[in-house]
Amino acid sequence: MSAITHVGFLGLGNMGAAMAMRLIQPESKVHVFDLNPAAVAQLVEAGAIAHTSPRSVADSADVVMACLPSIDACEAAIFGPEGVAAGKAVHTYVEMSTIGPTAVSSIAKRLADNRIVTIDAPVSGGPSAARAGTLSIMVAGSSDDIARAMPWLGHIAKTLHKIGDRPGQAQAMKLVNNIMLAANMAVASEALAMGAKAGLDADAMIDVIKSSTGQSAAADILARFAIPAAFDFGAHISIVAKDVELAIAEARALDVPVPVLDQARSLWHAALEQGRGGDDFTSIIKLVEARSNVLVRGAPRPTGAKAS
């Protein structure tokens, strides 16, 4: 990429802002849009170019990436009156939001009518990995299209998994990953609450789990962010609850029974009903603690320390 290239980014939340920041390179101009002026200002200070609409971004950048919170937000950003689909420069749209295979397949078909190709590219790893450029990205689309986006994806990810040639396939893989985490977070919270109420020390439980068959990503996340009472992973409960609902809808469409996931859903849904949607998703253990009348806490993090 010796010549100056132009890339756009829509959605500057916890994940999007971190990814867009990594795209700011000497050989590229990064064009950004978000409804939150403060989020845009942070990127502009780092060297990005602010725009007033997704269409304005797509008028300036041939590749536009997006990390948005919902299907409705994606639809508005792409097909709204000032959406990406009407852009004059864009030829590749990279969907990094988690909105499910049905939605992305539909988006890809409609963008193709505007001669815009779609790369399905949801991410995993959380805000800290986004800041470090060590995300895992699941990609689906034609190999040629993906190759054209690789210079930018390479700034964001440590690992890229080619899932298939059809947009929507990477979304299916992302849901598989996320519902495993969501269900495991629920049962890990219940297990730790049971142990605490039986008189077990929280840190001792974590030490045993780390070297035993109960070890999981969910247990590790709770150990690093919930047990020390930090609750600062950086993902909201509402996002996990949304992914669970997407997965259940897709499972029903595929005629796959998911009774265990339905049970896990009830915990995430209860958190929403209690107004906790904006809380860090590691605080899901608080609902289990309240139901069990027990607190699962270990040693706090040292002052100034961050979860590794």
Image (tube, grey):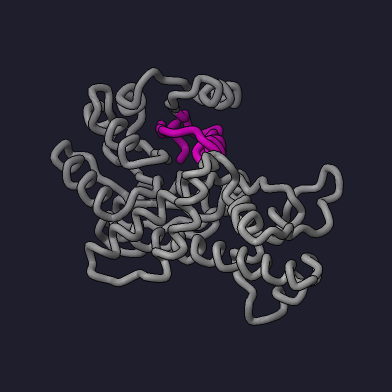
Instruction: Specify the quadrant of the image occupied by residue 202.
Output: bottom right
Seen in the picture, residue 211 relative to 184 is either above or below; the reply is below
Asked if the magenta segment contains residue 175, the reply would be no
Instruction: Specify the quadrant of the image occupied by residue 189.
Output: bottom right
Q: In x, y percent, where is residue 279?
A: 58, 42
Q: Nearer the viewer, residue 114 or 34?
A: 34
Residue placed at 37% from the left, 57% from the top?
139
Residue 143 visible, this orientation: no
Residue found farthest to the right: 302
Residue placed at 60% from the left, 45% from the top?
280
User: Residues in magenta?
Assistant: 1-30
Q: Nearer the viewer, residue 261 or 71?
A: 261
Quadrant (top left, top right, bottom left, bottom right) of the C terminus: bottom right
**How many numbered discs, if any?**
0
Left or right? Give the position of 233 relative to 32: right
Residue 233 visible, this orientation: yes
Residue placed at 39% from the left, 39% from the top?
65
Quadrant (top left, top right, bottom left, bottom right) of the N terminus: top left
